[in-house]
């Protein structure tokens, strides 16, 4: 197990290196730069700025310097937000995005699985149809419409929750709901179809022939086997959700990491682009690793390669 | 002999898009205490549906018990609620399925799958159940049961898994064991071992067995009595000797003739019953076997044959037994086996419908 994780960490480092390299050169290949705006800067000032940020040096110097500083967990200063480093941006934004993300992940997973299981157990009955209508709505309604709808109904009309801003736990409910709707619906559908497949398996009939009740069969035999596809989906999902959503953060006025993702690109804010990309990659790669480990725990047939139990 | 199970005029249908499939069409038989009844027939003859109906395992809907009684230990299982059935399944009736590769939960330890039965029906606590699970694994001939009990099904071979399934089915000493083609998915050497094991355990525990198979070779080895099913009906039923040495129904002849034997040489082609079983959405008028029956008479296509009683234990549903029917010779392969059985009546007797 430890050996396996060690090997996976090594390959993660390699992927990270490739991601950094690719992003670095793609970014340089894009036209424009951090200081090109509508109003052209005087050439002297632009030259000074380039010198100050080291953009005048040859690309290989910049590239290797960047690799070295990333190894030291230093993403450099932001070009647009004066006086702030990329580390500052991440340190401020990520905890907020992470909290919001965790909340909506929990919502999405718990309610999604519950709906999926209920739908599968009542296949082709009203509970099934109800849950699936709900799921189709969740998937097809974009999160910004969901967000506005929630704000209008639950905040403005009913006054149960604050409309926006990031101050107390109350403030987190609406954005978490809006963010969770789509993944929740997706998980519900995934769980349902996977549950239906599992329920038609021979070992479910065996369990029934043992005299186990419906509840016992569902909890002990069906759900665990049905969750494998959901777990697979959770890896990329949690990476995406934990690093923040641009739209939701904008609508609810939440100071998260999501906006940096989008804005830094149009700003050509090189260091921020690089910083958030690397940070996102690390979260994604760790989430995928975690999923693989959980997979092995759920299904004993999946042996983690390199583990000493390997056949 | 005391009857443990009596199935009376059982009818089971499935509602499908194509219409109502009458999978079991009035089946009656019984199983005595401690004996083995084999149910043989081709795929689609209704043998598995019959056995799963006894356990009330057929999904309803689309399945439906349309008629009949299943008297087990004096109680009618057809009238039981699901909750009541849970107390019978696994406790009084155990079941082994065809494919051991898929019949065990892949994500649960084998020991735990046995323990489930014990904690549910014997109200054992965890450690006692584990003790007993190890004991059961040893009983079904799994070496190193202390280690095996903590392993997952994928660490077992096919034969070992079927042994584990037998351990699950026998965990709470059921009165009746239903084995639905338990050796079909296993290779021949393992088949023999599993059959030996089942016979051995039956002797030790006194369990009655319903053994479902399409392999007549297995039947000769295992059963006390045999019921031959075709198109949802029992066409012939009798003791092993009666079925093998004095078969009366042309379908049974066909089955026996298509069984390879050691003295058949390789030049002769193996006999087969031509055609395929009828579609049970619209069961044919008359005898369902008539279109495939070389001995079929005009009446076979018009009127269903009644049950004839050839001896106290031997029944067959064919017009050939009628006093007015012409004498016919069974196929060569069957003729070689025929013996005079002393228990036969001088004349077959028509059994009244009501029986």
Image: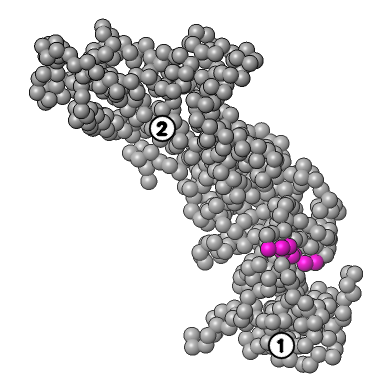
Q: Are marks 1 and 2 on the same chain?
A: no
- Judge left or right: residue A144 versus residue B251: left
Specify start and end residues of the magenta stretch as a single range: B18-26
Q: Name the foreground residue: B275 vs B53.
A: B275
Q: Dot 2 lies on which element?
A: helix
Q: Name the foreground residue: A105 vs B56.
A: A105
Q: Residue at x 56, y 18 (%)?
A: A151
Q: Dot 1 lies on which element?
A: loop
Q: Residue at x 72, y 58 (%)?
A: B15
- Could you give the CA–CA distance between mark 1 and mark 2, rounded to whole angstroms? 68 Å
Q: Name the foreground residue: B327 vs A47.
A: A47
Residue A176 rendering spot, x and y as whole percentages: 52, 21
Residue B101 rendering spot, x and y as whole percentages: 53, 53
Q: Which residue is mark 2?
A: A236
Tell which subunit mark 1 falls on.
B
- Judge left or right: residue B100 versus residue B125: left
Tell which subunit mark 2 falls on.
A
Q: State the image quarter where residue A15 is shown.
A: top left
Q: Is residue B36 above or below residue A198?
A: below
Q: Residue at x 88, y 72 (%)?
A: B353
Q: Do we see residue B35 in this rendering?
A: no
Q: State the image quarter where residue B192 is shown.
A: bottom right
Q: Which mark is residue B295?
A: 1
How many residues crowd mark 1 within 10 Å: few (<14), some (14–19), many (20+)? some
Residue B24 falls inside the magenta stretch: yes
Q: Is residue B121 above or below residue B1?
A: above
- Judge left or right: residue B351 versus residue A151: right
């Amino acid at each position: 197990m430890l050996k396996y994780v060690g090997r996976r960490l090594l390959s993660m480092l390699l992927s990270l290196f490739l991601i950094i390299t690719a992003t670095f050169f793609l970014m340089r290949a894009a036209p424009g730069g951090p200081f090109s705006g509508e109003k052209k800067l005087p050439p002297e000032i632009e030259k000074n700025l380039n010198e100050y940020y080291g953009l005048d040096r040859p690309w290989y110097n910049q590239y290797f310097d960047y690799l070295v500083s990333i190894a030291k967990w230093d993403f450099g200063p932001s070009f647009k937000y004066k006086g702030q480093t990329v580390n500052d941006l991440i340190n401020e934004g990520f905890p907020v995005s992470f909290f919001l993300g965790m909340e909506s992940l929990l919502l999405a997973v718990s309610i999604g699985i519950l709906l999926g299981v209920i739908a599968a157990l009542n296949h082709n009955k009203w509970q099934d149809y109800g849950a699936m209508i709900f799921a189709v709505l969740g998937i097809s309604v974009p999160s910004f419409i969901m967000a506005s709808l929630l704000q209008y109904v639950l905040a403005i009309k009913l006054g149960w929750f604050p409309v926006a801003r990031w101050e107390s736990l109350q403030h987190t409910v609406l954005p978490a709901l809006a963010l969770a709707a789509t993944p929740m619906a997706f998980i519900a559908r995934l769980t349902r179809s996977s549950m239906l497949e599992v329920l038609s398996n021979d070992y479910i009939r065996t369990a029934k022939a043992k005299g186990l009740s419906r509840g016992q069969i569902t909890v002990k035999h069906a759900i665990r086997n049905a969750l494998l596809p959901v777990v697979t989906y959770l890896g990329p999902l949690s990476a995406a959700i934990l690093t923040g959503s641009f739209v939701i953060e904008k609508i609810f006025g939440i100071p998260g990491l999501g906006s940096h993702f989008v804005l830094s690109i149009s700003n050509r804010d090189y260091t921020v682009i690089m910083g958030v990309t690397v940070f996102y990659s690390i979260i994604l790669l760790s989430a995928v690793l975690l999923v693989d480990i959980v997979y092995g725990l759920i299904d004993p047939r999946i042996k983690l390669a390199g583990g000493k139990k390997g056949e | 002999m005391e009857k443990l199970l009596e199935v009376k005029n059982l009818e089971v249908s499935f509602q499908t898009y194509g219409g109502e499939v009458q999978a079991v069409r009035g089946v009656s038989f019984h199983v005595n205490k401690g004996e083995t009844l084999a149910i043989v027939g081709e795929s689609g003859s209704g043998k598995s549906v019959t056995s799963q109906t006894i356990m009330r395992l057929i999904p309803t809907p689309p399945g439906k018990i349309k008629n009949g009684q299943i008297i087990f230990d004096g109680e009618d299982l057809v009238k039981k609620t699901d909750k009541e059935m849970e107390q019978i399944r696994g406790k009084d009736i155990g079941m082994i399925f065809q494919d051991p590769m898929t019949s065990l939960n892949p994500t649960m330890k084998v020991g735990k799958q046995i323990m489930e039965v014990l904690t549910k029906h014997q109200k054992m606590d965890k450690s006692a159940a584990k003790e007993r699970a190890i004991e059961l694994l040893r009983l079904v001939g799994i070496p190193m049961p202390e280690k095996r009990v903590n392993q997952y099904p994928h660490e077992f071979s096919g034969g070992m898994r079927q042994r584990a399934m037998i351990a699950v089915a026998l965990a709470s000493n059921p009165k009746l064991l239903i084995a639905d083609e338990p050796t079909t998915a296993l290779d021949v050497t393992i088949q023999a071992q599993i059959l030996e094991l089942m016979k051995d355990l039956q002797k030790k525990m006194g369990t009655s067995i319903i053994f479902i198979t399409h392999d007549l070779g297995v039947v000769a080895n295992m059963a006390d009595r045999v019921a031959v099913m075709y198109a949802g009906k029992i066409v012939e039923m009798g003791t092993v000797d009666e079925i093998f040495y004095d078969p009366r129904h042309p379908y049974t002849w066909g089955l026996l003739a298509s069984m390879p034997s050691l003295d058949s040489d390789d030049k002769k082609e193996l006999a087969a019953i031509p055609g395929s079983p009828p579609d049970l959405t619209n069961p044919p008028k008359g005898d369902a076997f008539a279109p495939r029956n070389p001995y079929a008479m005009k009446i076979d296509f018009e009127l269903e044959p009644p049950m004839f009683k050839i001896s106290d234990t031997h029944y067959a549903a064919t017009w050939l037994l009628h006093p007015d029917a012409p004498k016919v010779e069974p196929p060569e392969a069957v003729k070689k086996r025929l013996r005079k059985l002393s228990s036969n009546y001088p004349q077959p007797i028509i059994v009244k419908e009501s029986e």
